Image (cartoon, rainbow, N blue to C red):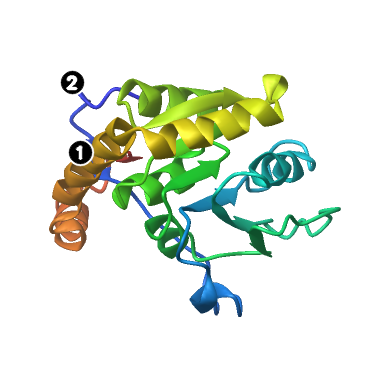
Amino acid sequence: MPTYDLPANHEYLGPVLWSPAGKPPTWWDSLPTDRPIVYATLGTSGGRNLLQLVLNALAELPVTVIAATAGRSDLKTVPANAFVADYLPGEAAAARSAVVVCNGGSLTTQQALVAGVPVIGVAGNLDQHLNMEAVERAGAGVLLRTERLKSQRVAGAVMQVISRSEYRQAAARLADAFGRDRVGFPQHVENALRLMPENRPRTWLAS
């Protein structure tokens, strides 16, 4: 949604972030440090075999993969370079990664971009496509389509993003912009709520 010429009852807040509570997996503090880390999570949208396809595609690459299944623990195989858990702290996982592979939804892309990490979005529905089109236009990621997904395309996109510094630079620019939005975020919300007319609905927009 465009963030210019907004109606008077709209407020722009910037990114709204969330990660599940809980302890990280036992392997969290002992990951290899000699290879780039790829954080892969596709949530609960799309086919159940997509994460397996992604893991298989990255199996022979010089990367370490950390993957969250979102409770879908039906992977047939876990490659030797992959570490898997049902859930991971998304912000922390994104921050320690060279690239994030996700479904292109707003939450995970924002977790990545706030950390200055580029995104590969495996988009399967309209809002994911639109979100990733914006990320791609900004130069901070690559849009892949679930209906055309091939292992070679996933592997190629990951190596392309890791090897070309312009993706990281574009993600860093977005991180700077997000950082400016987040300055004084709690106070901004408090002020806006205090000034909100009781008889007038107000719409809140996340990035």
Residue 62 falls left or right of residue 202: right
Residue beneath the point at 33% across and 39% down: 207
- Which residue is disc 1 drawn over? 173
Question: Could you say which is closer to the camera, residue 154 or residue 179?
Answer: 154
Q: Position of residue 139 (x, y in %)?
A: 32, 26
Question: Could you say which is closer to the camera, residue 194 or residue 48?
Answer: 48
- Which residue is disc 2 drawn over? 5
Q: Which picture quadrant has residue 132?
A: top left
Q: Which picture quadrant has residue 10?
A: top left
Question: Could you say which is closer to the camera, residue 53 or residue 137?
Answer: 53
Asked if residue 43 is positioned above or below residue 20 in the image, the reply reads above
Q: Is residue 191 visible?
A: yes
Do the residues bearing badges 2 and 1 touch, measured as CB atoms within 8 Å? no
Asked if residue 181 is positioned above or below residue 2 in the image, the reply reads below
Q: Position of residue 18 (x, y in %)?
A: 43, 59
Badge 2, how many Cα within 10 Å: few under 14, some, many 20+?
few
Q: Position of residue 88 (x, y in %)?
A: 56, 65
Dot 2 lies on which element? loop
Residue 81 falls left or right of residue 50: left
Residue beneath the point at 69% across and 56% down: 69
- Residue type for callout 2: Asp
Question: How far apart are labels 2 and 1 at the CA level?
Answer: 23 Å
- Residue type for callout 1: Arg
Dot 1 lies on which element? helix
